[in-house]
Image (tube, rainbow, N blue to C red):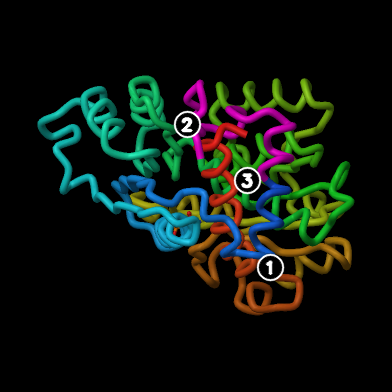
Amino acid sequence: MDRPERVRHFTKVSDLSVEEIRKILKRAFKLKERPHADRSLTGRTVALIFSKPSTRTRVSFSVGVYQLGGMALYLSEQELQMRSSESLEDTARVLSRFVDAIVIRTFAQSDVDELAAHATVPVINALTDERHPCQALSDIFTFEERFPDSKGRTITYMGDGNNVAVSLAAAGALSGIDVCLGIPEEYDLAPALWEEIQGLAAAHGTRVWVERDPERAVETASAVYTDVWTSMGQERDQGKLQALQPYQVNRGLMSVAPWEAIVMHCLPAHRGEEITDEIMDGPQSVVFDQAENRVHVQKALLTFLLGGD
Ligand code: CP
């Protein structure tokens, strides 16, 4: 695999065009059928910098790089000089001399953007407080796996306007899938992110809208999606948990959704909070397929970014 002429990063969903997302998801479907068929990362190394805990993202990138013939190098931020005694800029320049791509999970989106600005190899956002684009790409894959006629269907996200909601809405907008956000007023998306999402939806002829009434939010949904109400590193906020309680994905709510609706969750789940056991383990749930699909989609993403096609 030759290096592409222009370095491509994946710091947010809209770093990719509609056509590029199609190409990556098509490749991911092939990789899911034949996980060991592509060895195009042979001899190549991918750094995984994590400042927060992770099960799915860390393992799926590690396994994916290995299946592609490469080596994943896990680096916890505490063990690097990064930030404590070396700038992000210098870290980006040094790592670019050693590795072929940098995957980073951290707090501030601006840190990922700065790393990308100075790296000469692809930088992939593995979650920030603002965005989770790898999750969103994989979620669209899972949705299309169940609904190949995905265009014009609706994914309803129930919860607060967090990083998963932002990236899901962006990925829906670029994939011809409408996204309804079932969010209580005080937990809306940040205004700048909401404007960005509305711009993407308008440009691609899709709809992203907020519905405060939980039952109305799910009544036309092909997928009902939820995420934890207390994100990594946040204190448990009783007021927030109370405000979100009506948005819990449970039997009552799912009885209002169309019969064919699937249930999605990016995991980890706080069972009994945002989702009940019977729904998470029930026949409509695709949450473990969703977790598995992270590996197939990220392999396709890596081969796209590293191969340039
Ligand atoms: N969904 C997700 O990103 O899971 P991890 O935090 O375990 O990586």
Q: Residue at x 77, y 59 (%)?
A: 145
Q: Which residues are magenta?
A: 1-24
Q: Are marks 1 and 2 in contact (CB under 8 Å)?
A: no
The answer to whether 165 is drawn above or below residue 55 in the figure is: above
Please give the residue where the numbered disc 1 appears in the rendered image: 286
Nearest to N terminus: mark 1 or mark 2: 2
Q: Secondary structure at mark 3?
A: helix
In which quadrant of the rendered image does the C terminus lie?
Answer: top right
Q: Is residue 8 magenta?
A: yes
Q: Secondary structure at mark 1?
A: loop
Q: Amino acid at mark 2?
A: Arg
Q: Earlier in the sequence, mark 3 or mark 2?
A: 2
Horizontal and vertical percent for residue 163? 52, 41
Residue found farthest to the left: 85
Q: Write down the quadrant of residue 219 in the picture.
A: bottom right
In the structure shown, which secondary structural element does the residue marked by tag 2 occupy?
loop
Q: Amino acid at mark 3?
A: Leu
| C-alpha span from label 1 to label 2 | 36 Å
Residue that carries the numbered disc 3 in the rendered image: 137
Residue plotted at (56% across, 45% down): 164
Depth order, front residue of 5/111: 5
Q: CA distance from mark 3 to mark 1?
A: 15 Å
Of mark 3 and mark 1, the one earlier in the sequence is 3
Residue 239 location (% of width, % of height): 47, 51
Q: Is residue 235 visible?
A: no
